[in-house]
Image (spheres, rainbow, N blue to C red):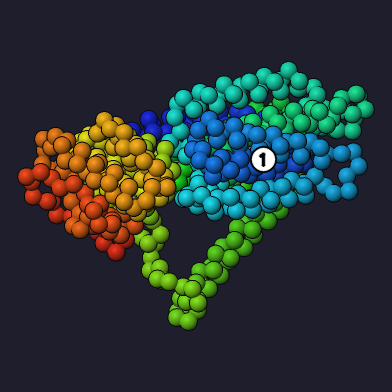
Amino acid sequence: MFDVLATISPWRLMAIPFAECLVLVGIHSYLGLHVIRRQVIFVDLSLAQIAALGTTAGFLAGIHPHSTGAFLFSLSFTFIGAAIFALTRTKKRHVPQEAIIGLVYALAAALVILVIDRAPHGAEHIKEMMTTGNILLVKGSEVIKAAIAYAAIGVFHYIFRDKFLAITNNAEEAEAKGINVAFWDLLFYMSFGFVITISVNTAGLLLVFVFLVVPAVIGAAITDKFRNQLIIGWIMGTIVSMAGLTLSYWLDLPTGPAVVAFYGIVLLLVALSLYVIRAKNHIKALRNLALGILALGLVVLYFEGLKKVILSNHHWTHGEYSGVRMHGPHHKKLSATQEYDNMDMDAKAAALKHSKNILKLQKLFQASKTPDGKIAVAERAVKIDPKAGSKMLFQVLASNAPSGFRDMALQHLKKICHKKFDIDLLTADHAAQAAMIAKVRQCLTTLPASSNAATRTPSQPGGATNPNGAAAQPGMAVPAESSRPAARPIVPHHGGLHHLGHHGEPR
């Protein structure tokens, strides 16, 4: 990550994410035991995908993905999914419910892609929702809210535990006892969907699935008693989460995928250990284990040799659509600015929260390729140096960025200039926009100059640039410094950070 995160103590940085992991382990280990006994392993993925579809639909309607409105959209979609799963569980099933769950997942995933295709920066939204989430940047208030919500679900399940466990263990016997299976199944899946809707927002779909399944699988593999399975799941989930978060920090790995991978490693080790312990002939079990390790080594050697053969033949390494050839592991790691651009707006704001160096912010602003990235930098810069920050906002406003981001910049500039600038950027013609931009430019020239010359925003020759580096339209130039020479422009070199060193530090 870039320098603003490097100043934070690792224990302080990981404390809140670890607390979130504990909260997730507590409720998901319990629900995971129900899922395993019901043999509907992928219901979590399906409900999470439906929740993502709801958030995506709200996003397309103009609702921020991390707002209360988006949560209500997502929860409503999830309740519809819960009703589908409750109604499709019948006594005589010609089609397994797992097939229905998989079909719902596939349809929801397809609809997410179709819907998000109509939204700006849709790929980033899918990436966050489906994979990483933003657990590293989760807020303490979010952890508390989640803990309260999960506790309420836990109390609900404890009160009606007899009915839920009866249906989970044997639905036909439960129905014979007079329990309305369809009704209680609906309540189970609705409560389950409520938990998933909250969890996916911070942890991402894959991490939530692992929290649900792996601790429950480990507990179920060790003992048959529900209570003991739950205790083992809690203990293992706590230990593995702590270890995964620590490794992700010290090895500089993405947090969510690192925890998922570590869960997989622990599950494999537990399975191998139980295989040896429960074997009738321990010597034979150890021999089989050694043979398995040897076979794995041979597979690794095979692919290593295959790679050398392919790389030695130039025609095998290039396809019809191949681009620049990778020449080493150093090309695989994203630059600091690329990592920043891949974050969502909340994560960008959180990452910049502790930055106080206006020069670094100016360089990050110029290097960032996304309008939301530039907006986040400008918002932080305004708090440090209003003059420099307002110029950044003006560059976004005067660029060819999508109207939504230009409107965000305009809203900030209204507060800085204490003027209304009433205009709809989506429908206004070029003349009206040019007139508005001229008024904003005139306002910014009256702002007091910064007391430190080093904090001035580099001026752009020929006018402002848009987030893709293209020049703005005539008449939309950035306001010049009054009675001060223009600074030497800082421009990304061939799409990279030519002016930045390792991890975004100035050379």
In the rendered view, tell whether residue 60 sits above or below residue 11: below
- Count of all numbered marks drawn on residues in the image: 1
Q: Residue at x 13, y 37 (%)?
A: 449
Residue at (26, 30) in percent of width and height: 418
Amino acid type at image mark 1 = Leu
Kindly identify the residue that appears in the image at 26 percent across and 62 percent down: 493
Whether residue 290 sits left or right of residue 497 in the image: it is right
- For label 1, the residue is 47
Please tell me whether mark 1 sits on a helix, a strand or a loop: helix
Whether residue 260 appears in this view of the structure is no
Q: Quadrant of residue 392?
A: top left
Left or right, residue 63 beside residue 438: right
Give x and y (percent) for residue 386. Answer: 22, 35
Instruction: Answer yes or no: is residue 423 visible.
Output: yes
**Residue in the image at 70% along x and 20% along y:** 156
Question: Viewer-proximal residue, 180 or 335?
Answer: 180
In the picture, measured across the screen, residue 372 lies left or right of residue 459, that is: right
Q: In this orientation, which residue lies closer to the viewer: 222 or 306?
A: 306
Q: Position of residue 450 (x, y in %)?
A: 13, 37
Q: Up-down: is 83 above or below 320?
A: above
Question: How far across and how far down the image is residue 274, in percent?
Answer: 68, 43
Residue placed most toward the observer, 140 or 420: 420
What x and y, as percent, mark residue 131? 53, 47
Question: Where's the N terminus, which quadrant?
Answer: top left
